[in-house]
Amino acid sequence: RSVRWQDVAQAQHEACARRCRDHALVIVPVDGTSLAHTDRRGDDGVGPIGTRAAGALGLKAMTAIALTYDGVPLGVAAHTFWARSREPLTVPREERALQERESRFWTELQRDFDRTLAAEGADTRPWYQLDREGDATHVLVRTLESPVLLTVRANHDRLLTPNAKGTGRKALRKLREALCAAAPCGVMYLDVPRHRRRTERVARMEVRFERVSLRLRQRWSHEVLADVVVTAVRVCEVGTTPAGEEPIEWLLLTTFPVGGLEDALRVVRAYALRWVIERVNYTWKSGACRVEDSQLESFESLAKWATLHLSVATREQSILRLSRTQPELPATEVFDRDQVDAALALYHAYHPRQSSLPTVSTVGELVRLIAGLGGFAGSSRHNPGIKVFVRGMQRVDVAA
């Protein structure tokens, strides 16, 4: 009990920063989520999540995960938890100071990780990736405070600085209008996985980019706060959208220097890695750790439990990603020798008719073997998912 959840979290963040020292650039997606919790007596220190009318309770969380440039998680870069007040809000969100708003964590986590990298002596540049929730004025203003590498998906059709150099045409006053008027600089093809609202396909995406100056203003008073110069990169599906579906479109605002098509594609590919944090959250909450099943009865205990499992979820996704991006990596660089031997022994126990053990020496081979112990029966064209891998890994750890 003498160890606070923040102490456990700080140890995680420092370990992540040390792993980053081997990389000149790391991709850092930042994302918010909620952890549901049942609090029947009303004394567990949790608060409303989702809409207040729904009545759900739990913790709010925001997390930053450091990734290699091919999307392998290096660890938890920064994260925080908080509980919303159960009392009705009396002051509208727009009238509250930034320090009283949850959106402050979009930049606070960035600053926290910057400080941790510096403290650990990591000469590594983080490239932060934010989804549309992160398209906030104070997030963009931060680019003026210090040189930060940032990409955020635009959620607002922002006003351009009047007559600003680089907007292209004086008549263009809004961001989307400027991007639609820009000529396509090239085409990219995007593998679209099957989803309940998406048909699996290879999408043909037109790429445009434009250097723009955004006029940032107070929402209600329209007081000008700053003019921020960024590059807007727009990719939009053309010619491959199935009937009844909306074309895929991303409008990204970035401080990454874009001089041509190759740079624009780097921006798009880096942002595409943001989905890795979604997979970590899934593993954390549902896919393996099931942190929302906890019946601990205090904010401190819940936060500590969730922090420990966040590391587990990140580690599991790191192994899966390595098995896909670097399948020829020696298995002993990821697994202990006892784990490798235990997996082979279990395989032999489940396949007694095979007189000899399979030859397994790489991460890709061992992950598929372990997933098979968890029920994976996919073909060689498919990769195992987190649930079958974790089920197999639980058997391996017991045997080890």
Image (cartoon, rainbow, N blue to C red):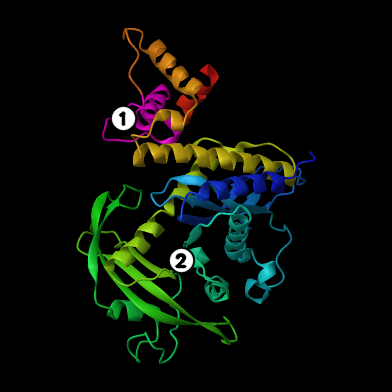
Q: Amino acid at mark 2?
A: Val
**How many numbered dots are placed on residues in this image?**
2
Q: Position of residue 151 (x, y in %)?
A: 45, 65
Would you identify the image quadrant in which residue 179 lies? bottom left
Could you say which disc has been placed on residue 152 in the image?
2
Q: Which residue is mark 1?
A: 378
Q: Residue at x 62, y 66 (%)?
A: 104
Q: Amino acid at mark 1?
A: Gly
Q: Position of residue 93 (x, y in %)?
A: 64, 71
The answer to whether residue 362 is left or right of residue 115 is left
Q: Which residues are magenta?
A: 361-389
Would you identify the image quadrant in which residue 366 lies? top left
The answer to whether residue 132 is left or right of residue 45 is left
Q: Position of residue 287 (x, y in %)?
A: 49, 37
Q: Residue at x 56, y 47 (%)?
A: 18
Q: Position of residue 314 (x, y in %)?
A: 52, 42
Quick check: 91 above or below 37? below
- Which element type, helix, strand or loop, lies under badge 2? strand
**Badge 2: how crowded within 10 Å, few (<14), some, or many (20+)?**
many
